[in-house]
Image (cartoon, grey):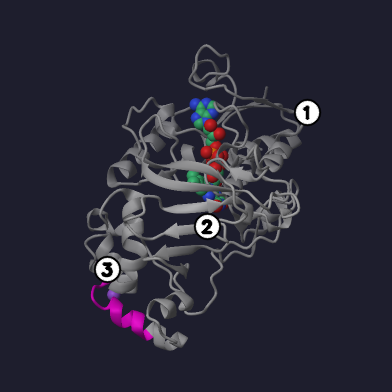
Amino acid sequence: MDLLIVGSGFFGLTIAERAAAAGRKVTVIDRRHHIGGNAYSANEPETGIEVHQYGAHLFHTSNPTVWEYVNRFTDFTSYVHRVYTTHKGVVFPLPINLGTINQFFQAAYTPDQAKALVQELAGEFDAKDAANLEEKGIALIGRPLYEAFIRDYTAKQWQTDPKDLPAEVISRLPVRYTYDNRYFNDTWEGLPVDGYTAWLERMADHPNIEVKLSTDYFDESQPLNKKDTVGQVPVVYTGPVDRYFDYAEGELSWRTLDFEQEVLPIGDFQGTSVMNYADADVPYTRIHEFKHFHPERADRYPTDKTVVVREYSRFATRADEPYYPVNTADDRTGLLAYRELAKGERDVHFGGRLGTYQYLDMHMAIGSALSMWNNQLA
Ligand code: FAD
Ligand code: NA
């Protein structure tokens, strides 16, 4: 073995694929029973509908290198992501755009009129003096839109009143003064035609790559553990950085998600893939209806059944799956300390969203792995 990779998510698999193509013998271990990290998906058995097991994953990128690379393993559908939100029993388009504003104010503002209105409403606070997230939100888009679309949703995401959240949690709240409600601005977007798992498996499908699942790097009863490999073979580690150092500099904090999945005996529950719930009286943040991610599979998917997943957000304990970095001041201090420790680890390369404590979209994880391969490992 020339390289040991801990974690079979997009970061680890990209390194594995590049190394194997360059003639290196690679072993990838993952503590889960399946490949692919958080992008893993599986068909719901009763309906055959593909469900992303760790939350909905939409691929999008403007990076030509990444786009060329991912197209070696999968084709993409022409799916274009759009999100709606329910507020006081009425559905509005997101991100906040001219359609949202005109529906909310029951008006027919032109782009310039809407811009002038939002600027006037936003005058209540100056964004640079905002003492907390609430003041920042009002400073950016004004109180009415903030209270309708941001306040309670943010409170549900963080289990915290936005008045008690730091202003830095939001840097901007984009408002579009057109009716364009495409969620992403990237050059390319789409979903893998044969699903995420087929894509992830093709990346690992090479005689130089061995994948060992249900194998935890910190389990010393299996041979590919930390104690017996560091210094013996180059390691790419994509698990949580604080766990690697046995939490010596404290625990980095994360939010996690709980998913409640249900098969319903109806053809269509909500008419779209993602419906947010903006208000405090609904405990979940959003509902995904997975058949809508693949309208091109209409002939294969049942017409009398559908799969919906309600998503709840909360702070993670050590036993939970870490999803989004909280990134408090303590976390930032801890991260710097871990980065120093990481420099001292001989031939261990920390990467991916857990190894660097950073939210990374898939295209960012893949792009970052391609850079690590080219600059440090090749
Ligand atoms: P991961 O996929 O997390 O892979 C890390 C792997 O390491 C895991 O499989 C884990 O089991 C393994 N591991 C950890 N510890 C150990 C250990 N001790 N021993 C062995 N293995 C270990 N990106 C998008 O582009 N679009 C989206 O719409 C999108 N939606 C998302 C929604 C949610 C809820 C989340 C959480 C993420 C989303 N992402 C999305 C981001 C996407 O999931 C990441 O870009 C991708 O997972 C990064 O890959 P990774 O390899 O860095 O990490
Ligand atoms: Na302002």
Q: Position of residue 24 (x, y in %)?
A: 72, 30
Is 360 in front, or is 179? 179
Q: Which of marks 2 and 3 is nearer the N terminus?
A: 3
The answer to whether any part of residue 255 appears in the image is yes
What's under tag 1, amino acid-wise?
Answer: Pro
Residue placed furthest toward the right: 207
Closer to us: 318 or 278: 278
- Per the picture, the main secondary structure of the magenta-coloured stretch is helix
Q: Is residue 361 above or below residue 167?
A: above
Pointer 2: what residue? 274
The crowd level at tag 3 (other Cα within 10 Å; few <14, some 14-19, many 20+) is few
Disc 1 packing (10 Å; few <14; some 14–19; many ≥20): few
Would you say the residues marked 1 and 3 are in contact, meaning their CB atoms lie under 8 Å apart? Answer: no
Q: Which residue is nearer to you in this view: 129 or 256?
A: 256
> Element at badge 1?
loop
Q: Neighbour class for label 2 at 10 Å: few (<14), some, many (≥20)?
A: many
Disc 1: which residue: 207
- Residue indicated by mark 3: 128
Q: Can you give x and y, in whole percent of width and height, for residue 270 in the image?
A: 54, 59
Magenta residue check for 234: no
- Dots 2, 3 in contact, CB < 8 A: no
